[in-house]
Image: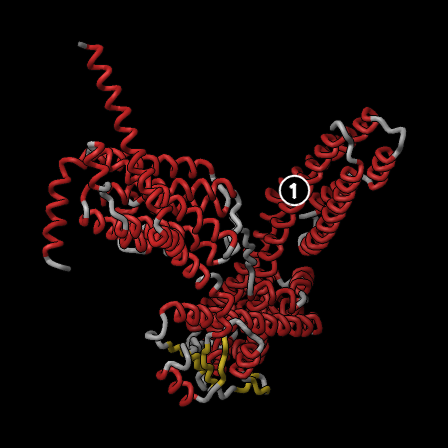
């Protein structure tokens, strides 16, 4: 009995496979024998590809054609006068734009530009107002006003064009800012150069101020002593007060001179601090570059050793690598020379602060691999009698030299960060702090001098009054003496060495410093994957959508029921019918996927980094989409078609194919993992730009899950058949 049961199951299994293959074979024969059916199938295989190719080609490289986008420019700038010279920033902007081909700039009057914007002739207007230059110039005053450029766009013409023109406007604004900042800084530094010249010219007078303060201190001490003696002799006290009033203009004049020097020093200090900060940045960057270059030398020596120990010695490659080491050593030496110049300048300001680092850098330079050693190694390699042992011994010798250089570089780097940079920062901070204290004292003394003058006048007029008044005056003179002592202490920084240090910093090159201050950061762009062309980036999305559309069309156009006579003769079950028709749809889907994917390469010129992965992705996507769409349509009928269309609609916005899904409403990010498009697009991206295999494996697993899940959907074919056929009959009764 059990034997008969097993035999019957085996027979049913063979019959099932025979019926499935029979349905598939009959459909293929029908297509081949019927020219109309064959033409429809061919069209069905090709037409979906056109959707992908047309859309990809249309969006291939739109940003290279932005020069065709017309943007009107209106220059109403009246200009202004600066330092006796007429300037007009608007004209300079127009001159620059005429040499700019990124946008189709049209230079028009305001009325013509606005009319063209409203009519749609121009996408946007950039208007430079009449007070633009005047506004820029106020940035140099104590009451600056931010100048503005008016940007107007016709939003109804094209959303993307508005973004492009807006970006052009932002770029223009940035360029204006950098140019202005550079010009202002250059002018300021040139003024500092002139001021430095004047300070150097009048250095003796500046130093005389300190001497005058010392003399004033002595005068005040004598004045106070005389006032005390006035308690004994009021007559002599009156005469002395007159002498005091004669000396007050000298003190007032000295204070005024000091204030002028302090004000000038404020500009000098600001420039000095910026220069010191720039030096710190340069030293940091150069030390990092020296480390990198030295590391390259070590790597190249190791590479030479590997080449020497290989079976076939490539002498040309080894000699070329030795030449590269020589060039690298020259680069290290050049950077060391440049840094030593900076450090010597700092050493002149603060003697002994950078001597150690200078010696260490010279030690690095002297310990670099000599050119003679490298030439000797090349001669040994090129020699016919050379052997690996001799070459390896020479290479080991050079590696030891390189290791010594590396240790010296590390030692120098530690000295830079632990000693030199703190000294530079301390010098910068001391300049500002000292100047603040001097200005505060000068303001206090300036207020005391008028009081002292008034007090002296009062004392002269009332010299015949009681001697008790002289005690009060003596007390006030004592307070002034305290303030003057503080000023004398602060003025002690006005030494010849400090003034010479400031003069050295003020005489920097204006072009170099202004260039750094206007644009202190240079961004270096590096591509990770080779997919910079916009159309290449869209290929995964449109290719996936085309395959989905093609399979959906096949399920909608073709009859998914087996031929009635065949079904009756072979007792075809719903499951057999499901898988028999699925083979036809799968065949068409694979052909569609291969056509569109190979067309991407042959017709559009897409160059996938991994061709086999690209073709494998096409086949996997075809199988996955067939399982999903056919499973839905076969089991649920017209409802399944609707579900497939809805999935495609959500995929357009919610899979990150066109825009990052993070920029869309949150619901799309939540639903993104549910769509097979997400993983199909990711697979194509990996194949085109270069695979990250962890991502490839992850997406492959997810697509395999879709295949398994929708294969299992076939178990609902039989119970859902009555429902789907009933709904189809009801729909057919409508005559639509």
Q: Residue 710 falls in which quadrant of the image?
A: top left
Point 19% across, 46% down: residue? 637
Residue 103: image location, x then y, percent: 50, 74
Comparing 292 with 95, the one in front is 95
Asked whether, in this view, residue 79 is left or right of residue 203, the answer is: left
Task: Say whether residue 657 is visible.
Answer: no
Residue 53: image location, x then y, percent: 43, 58
Residue 622: image location, x then y, percent: 37, 43
Asked whether, in this view, residue 692 is left or right of residue 38, the answer is: right
Figure check: 405 above or below 266: above
Asked whether, in this view, residue 481 is left or right of residue 709, the answer is: right
Residue 49: image location, x then y, percent: 40, 54
Residue at image mark 1:
291
Q: How many labels, in total? A: 1
Figure check: 374 above or below 650: above
Point 47% across, 65% down: residue? 62
């Amino acid at each position: 009995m059990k034997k008969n049961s097993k035999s019957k199951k085996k027979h049913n299994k063979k019959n099932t496979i025979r019926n499935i293959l029979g349905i598939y074979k009959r459909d293929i024969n029908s297509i081949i024998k019927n020219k109309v059916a064959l033409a429809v199938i061919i069209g069905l295989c090709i037409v979906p590809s056109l959707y992908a190719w047309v859309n990809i080609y249309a969006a291939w490289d739109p940003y290279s054609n932005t020069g065709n986008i017309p943007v009107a420019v209106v220059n109403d700038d009246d200009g202004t006068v600066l330092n006796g010279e007429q300037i007009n920033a608007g004209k300079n902007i127009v001159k620059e734009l005429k040499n700019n081909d990124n946008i189709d700039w049209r230079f028009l009057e305001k009325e013509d530009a606005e009319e063209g914007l409203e009519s749609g002739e121009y996408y946007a207007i950039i208007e430079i107002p009449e007070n633009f230059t005047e506004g820029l110039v106020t940035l140099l005053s104590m009451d600056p006003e931010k100048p503005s450029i008016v940007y107007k766009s016709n939003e109804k013409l094209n959303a993307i064009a508005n973004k492009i023109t807006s970006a052009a406007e932002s770029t223009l604004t940035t360029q204006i800012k950098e140019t202005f900042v550079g010009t202002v800084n250059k002018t300021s530094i040139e003024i500092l150069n002139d001021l430095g010249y004047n300070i150097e010219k009048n250095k003796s007078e500046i130093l005389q101020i300190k001497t005058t303060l010392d003399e004033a201190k002595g005068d005040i001490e004598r004045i106070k002593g005389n006032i005390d003696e006035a308690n004994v002799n009021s007559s002599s006290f009156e005469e002395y007060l007159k002498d005091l009033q004669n000396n007050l203009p000298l003190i007032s004049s000295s204070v005024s001179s000091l204030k002028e020097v302090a004000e000038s020093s404020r500009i000098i200090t600001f420039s000095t601090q910026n220069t010191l900060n720039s030096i710190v940045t340069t030293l940091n960057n150069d030390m990092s570059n020296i480390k990198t270059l030295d590391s390259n030398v070590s790597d190249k020596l190791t590479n030479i050793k590997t080449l020497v120990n290989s079976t076939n010695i490539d002498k040309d490659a080894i000699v070329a690598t030795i030449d590269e080491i020589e060039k690298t050593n020259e680069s290290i030496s050049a950077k060391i020379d440049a840094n030593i110049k900076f450090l010597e300048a700092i050493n002149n300001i603060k003697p002994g602060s950078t001597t150690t680092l200078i010696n260490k850098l010279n030690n690095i330079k002297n310990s670099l691999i000599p050119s003679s050693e490298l030439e000797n190694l090349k001669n040994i390699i090129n020699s016919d009698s050379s052997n690996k042992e001799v070459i390896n011994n020479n290479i080991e010798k050079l590696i030891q030299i390189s290791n010594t250089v590396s240790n010296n570089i590390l030692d120098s780097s530690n000295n830079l960060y632990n000693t030199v940079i703190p000294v530079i920062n301390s010098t910068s901070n001391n300049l500002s702090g000292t100047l603040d204290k001097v200005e505060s004292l000068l303001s206090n003394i300036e207020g005391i001098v008028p009081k002292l003058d008034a007090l002296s006048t009062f004392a002269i007029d009332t010299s015949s009054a009681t001697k008790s008044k002289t005690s009060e005056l003596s007390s006030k003179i004592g307070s002034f003496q305290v303030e003057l002592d503080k000023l004398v202490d602060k003025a002690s920084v006005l030494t010849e060495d400090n003034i010479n240090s400031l003069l050295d910093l003020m005489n920097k090159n204006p072009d170099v410093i202004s260039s750094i201050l206007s644009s202190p950061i240079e961004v270096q762009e590096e591509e990770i994957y080779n997919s910079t062309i916009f159309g290449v980036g869209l290929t995964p999305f449109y290719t996936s959508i085309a395959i989905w559309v093609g399979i959906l069309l096949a399920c909608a156009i073709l009859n998914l029921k087996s031929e009635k006579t065949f079904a009756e003769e072979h007792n075809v079950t719903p499951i057999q019918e499901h898988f028999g028709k699925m083979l036809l749809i799968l065949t068409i889907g694979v052909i569609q996927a291969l056509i569109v994917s190979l067309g991407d390469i042959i017709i559009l010129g897409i160059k996938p980094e991994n061709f086999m992965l690209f073709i494998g992705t096409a086949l996997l996507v075809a199988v996955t989409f067939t399982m999903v769409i056919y499973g839905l349509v076969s089991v649920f009928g017209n409802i399944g078609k609707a579900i497939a269309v809805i999935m495609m609609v959500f995929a357009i916005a919610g899979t990150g194919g066109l825009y990052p899904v993070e920029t869309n409403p949150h619901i799309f990010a939540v639903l993104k993992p549910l769509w097979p498009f997400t993983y199909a697009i990711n697979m194509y991206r990996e194949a085109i730009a270069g695979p990250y295999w962890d991502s490839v494996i992850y997406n492959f697993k997810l697509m395999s899950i879709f295949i398994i899940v929708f294969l299992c959907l076939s178990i609902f074919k039989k119970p859902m058949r009555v429902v789907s056929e009933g709904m189809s009959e009801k729909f057919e009764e409508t005559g639509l």
